[in-house]
Image (tube, coloured by chain):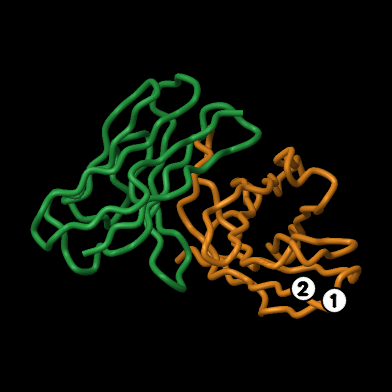
Chain colours: A orange, B green
Amino acid sequence: EVQLVQSGAEVKKPGESLKISCKTSGYTFTDYWIGWVRQVPGKGLEWMGIIYPGDSDTRYSPSFQGQVSISADKSTTTAYLQWSSLKASDTAIYFCAKSYGGYSYYFDYWGQGTLVTVSS
Amino acid sequence: EIVMTQYPATLSVSPGERATLSCRASQTFSRDLAWYQQKPGQAPRLLIYSASTRATGVPARFSGSGSGTEFTLTISSLQPEDSAIYYCQQYNKWPPLTFGGGTKVEI
């Protein structure tokens, strides 16, 4: 069974750093892209970026390029999303999602979401 | 960037009725479009990919159609559990992958 299990909710102050995780199981981690999607409470879905764990090829949305960093650890089949300096506007739910595969970049399995709250 | 626009923003329908949700792309492409359902407090769930192929386990009352710039998700006979927000997503030209703003279906 494919599973993506994300780390728990975080409360941070502006300027702090953060790394959230997405632990995967049930499939070959290195064969499928994993994406990250932001959802501000009450708003829609925004694609942030995607990584191919097989070779760490990473692509970002222009809106998030330079604001976040995506990585993956093959040894633990875990993907990560990190910030070096959080802003209040980063308050949102963050989902990781597995791509279907091949050249089909839609998402067939999703994590449960990680709520990040940034407040002074 | 391909901009995806969904309409209407909100759709109110009665149980058993048909619901038609639309998604318009700012550039034409073939069928690289997916639909997701998101219920409150949950992650999105894949419903449709390749514009018209139902994902595993998705009831037959959900169907997708379209190509070019106009795509449609139809729910043939609405059930109470179909109350949710529905999003389209294009994966033809990226980055970025882009989602529509969503259509809220109220029953």
For marks 1 and 2 on the same chain, the one whose residue lies earlier in the sequence: 1
Check residue B64 in the rendering and tell me which mark sits there, or answer none.
none
To which residue does mark 2 refer?
A118
Q: Residue most toward the left?
A: B16
Q: Is residue B101 left or right of residue A119?
A: left
Give the chain letter at badge 1: A
Secondary element at image label 2: strand
Classed neighbour count for the residue bearing mark 1: other residues with Cα under 10 Å, few (<14), some (14–19), many (≥20): some
Residue B99 is situated, as x and y percent measured from the top left of the image, at: 51, 43
Contact between marks 1 and 2 (CB within 8 A): the answer is yes
Pick the residue in front: A12 or A112. A12
Query: Image height check: is A114 above or below B23?
Result: below
Quadrant showing the C terminus of chain A: bottom right
Write the residue at 78% across / 67% down: A88
| Amino acid of disc 1 | Lys
Query: Image height check: is A66 above or below B16?
Result: above
Residue B91 is situated, as x and y percent measured from the top left of the image, at: 52, 34
Quadrant showing the N terminus of chain A: bottom left
Give the chain letter at badge 2: A
Q: Is residue B10 left or right of residue B19?
A: right
Residue B12 is situated, as x and y percent measured from the top left of the image, at: 23, 57
Q: Quadrant of residue A93?
A: bottom right
Pick the residue in front: B26 or A8. B26
Write the residue at 40% across / 24% down: B69
Q: Quadrant of residue B20?
A: top left
| Amino acid of disc 2 | Val
Query: Image height check: is A115 above or below A31?
Result: below
Judge if badges 1 and 2 mark residues of a common chain: yes
Residue A10 is situated, as x and y percent measured from the top left of the image, at: 73, 78
Check residue A13 in the rendering and tell me which mark sits there, or answer none.
1
Secondary element at image label 1: loop
